[in-house]
Image (spheres, helix red, strand yellow):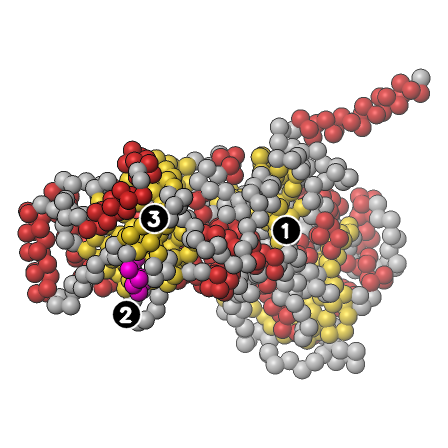
Amino acid sequence: SSAAMAAVRGRALLAPLGARLRAGPRAPLRSAASAPPLYDVVVSGGGMVGSAMAAVLGHDIHFHDKKIALLEAGPRKEYDHMPESYSNRVSSISPGSATLLSSCGAWDHVCSLRHKPFRRMQVWDACSEAMIVFEKDDLDDMGYIVENDVIMSALTKQLDAVADQVEVFYQSRAVGYTWPVPSHSCDTSPWVQVELADGRRLHTKLLIGADGHNSLVRKEAEIKNIEHQYDQSAVVATLHLSEATDNNVAWQRFLPTGPIALLPLSDTASSLVWSTSHDHASELLAMDEECFVDSINSAFWSNINHSDFIDAAGAMFRSALSLLKPSGTAVRQLPPSVAQVDPESRAMFPLGMGHAAEYVRHRVALVGDAAHRVHPLAGQGVNLGFGDIACLAHHLSAAAFNGSDLGSLKHLLKFETERQRHNVSLIAATDVLKRLYSTTMAPLVLLRTWGLQATNALPPVKVRI
Amino acid sequence: NVSVSLMTFSFSLFRFTVKRPYSTSHSSVDSKEMKKFQLLAHKWWDEEGEYSALHSMNDIRVPFIRDTLLSRSSNYHLGNPLSGIKILDVGCGGGLLSEPLGRLGASVTGIDPVEDNIRTADRHKSFDPVLAKRIQYKSSSLEEIVEESMETFDVIVASEVVEHVADLETFIKCCSQVLKPEGSLFITTINRTQLSYVLGIVVAEKIMGIVPEGTHEWEKFVPPEELEHLLESNGFSVQSVTGMLYNPLWGAWSWVGSTSLNYAVHAVKGGAGGRARPTDAPSQTDVQQHPATAGTAG
């Protein structure tokens, strides 16, 4: 009968469709009517690194006609002026990172909101007199201490400026990713599919994972991650100094329990980053404000961990050095003393290190903490992320100007090679430093004492750092 | 008559709907060549497969075309450098060169006599709505579109094609017909030298498999002098001839001084007055270097 014929014909039509569905668990159904919107780049994660990535690409002239999407799980963050009190989450921004933020116009906003340049970094040991001072010969700033909220606000403003290129999805958490099969099979969608919590789907030619050290992009791409939880948490707080001072020095002292750092926020305020054991961190949070302030001052000033042997050995080495290199020892400055802590500003978060075995896959790239996580002792975390952005944006810009497929591994691998070469040595060095300074054992203290003194005396090594 | 039987063979094989306007004994399409490419029609887009050398050739031929056209234009936007330019990609294959040109803003018409190639190209572009609009593919030879496309295109690109055509002079004449006055013709091809036999056929095809075996016939390679002569005597002015070299270790192409192997030509069709504009770049003996330009970030 005609109905039966129609049914058979209908089923025959559906058969190839079924084959396409069965072809693989990840082959999406291609239907013109319901095709998800296609973006050239989707950046997953709207933190400092993700927002900067989107802003830099959006301002790139070769991306003028491209469509970029930025996915952020949280709400929009913008301030016209900062609240009176400082936020307890701050970052040390290197001059290179400041240049990157300048390139997308965000640095001007940072300067007009709030930031503190510093000229000098003094790093010393709790177990000896050894110290190392970093400063530039000219009058340039070494770096800047900026509240993370300020950076976010500046980036939000600059994202608004390129709204034609960048579409920001706030309150939009990505919950799943679907990867394309290799392009030459040609039957299924060649794009990455992103699924949001509210069920919306996006397609993209390149997915950039900037979603932090627990990156979902990295996990779903099944990229191996070497990670290690340190037995440490960082305690942060906003501190008020006993007296106003030029406050243009960043201080860090290596205690056996972990480094304590004082980062200048203004002439009267500094930010604390104290990495210590989980137990000690909880104690610091629980104790009353006076005890807390006393602990900080004691950590910076006390010589309880010195031993006569180490002091003598250190002094001997220092005189030997001054024979060889008379100008090789710098003046030791004294850190400021703390008077009080901002109420409500104390917080702690656990520390770990991580490094992704691969930064890229076909149509995927990882930047920032999604690719590498490092101990805050070197103040490098976000700077590594900004470095990733500068490198990736450079390669994507060239690829766009060549008419290339943005998700092509060819240029993504160049980014990976460049950044892994740079990042791995720094992350490894930071890890080694962390372990080296976690001990009071004399031989190791001597080693690092002499090492620090020697490094302080040798300009080439210091410049590299 | 061999040419007539070639024509009938093509007719029966490909069922052209457009009747040939005239029966000519000269056709630029060689059916033996078509058969070779048909077998590999589905392999175009495997970047690591048989066509990997063509994929990496984009790294130099796209900037070459882009920068030449930018230098001849006074009105462009770096975000969309080829916007408003109509390009004909002759022998487009799977669309390897059409797509980057489309991404840079050009309106591209890609033609190829092998229907399977066109099918692959159409399918590949269909997933990107921007490209789908900017690029049109057609299964056709160059002669077949001449009548409907007189002086239609700003640019013709014939990359790795002239070493496969049966009649090069007809091919060039047709290019001239469909190109606007002062339009640009870009050709990349292989020289006919002892070196190109050893490296281009023996090593590339038989030993290293850089190119699928049987792809090229050395007798059809074109020396740059011959190409230049044909171009100049058919209304073109040759602007530059530059050597290209493939490094199989890195899988990368570069510009070189010698044209003994691969080379690229840029020629301009004479103006409306029928004479080509005077050139400041003498051809062949004075090769120009095309530095690899990375895109400048804005």
Q: Residues within 10 Å of mark 1 (few under 14, many from 20)?
A: some
Q: Is residue B283 above or below residue A243?
A: below
Secondary structure that dominates the magenta span: loop
| Distance from the alpha carbon under mark 2 to that under mark 1 | 44 Å
Q: Nearer the viewer, residue A237 or A194?
A: A237
| Distance from the alpha carbon under mark 1 to that under mark 3 | 40 Å
In the rendered structure, the answer to whether residue A334 lies left or right of residue A80 reads left
Q: Residues within 10 Å of mark 2 (few under 14, many from 20)?
A: few
Q: Locate residue A101, reporting x and y percent.
A: 48, 60
Q: Which residue is mark 2?
A: A137
| Distance from the alpha carbon under mark 2 to that under mark 3 | 34 Å
Residue at disc 1, secondary structure: strand
**Type of amino acid under label 1:** Glu
Which segment did they paint magenta? A243-250
Q: Quadrant of the C terminus of chain A?
A: bottom left
What residue lies at 85% left-to-right and 25% top-to-bottom? A9
Closer to the observer: label 1 or label 3? Answer: 3
Residue A341: assigned label: 3
Q: Nearer the viewer, residue A371 or B37?
A: A371
Closer to the observer: label 2 or label 3? Answer: 3
The disc numbered 2 marks a residue on which chain? A
Residue A99 is covered by the magenta coloring: no
Q: Locate residue B129, reporting x and y percent.
A: 72, 49
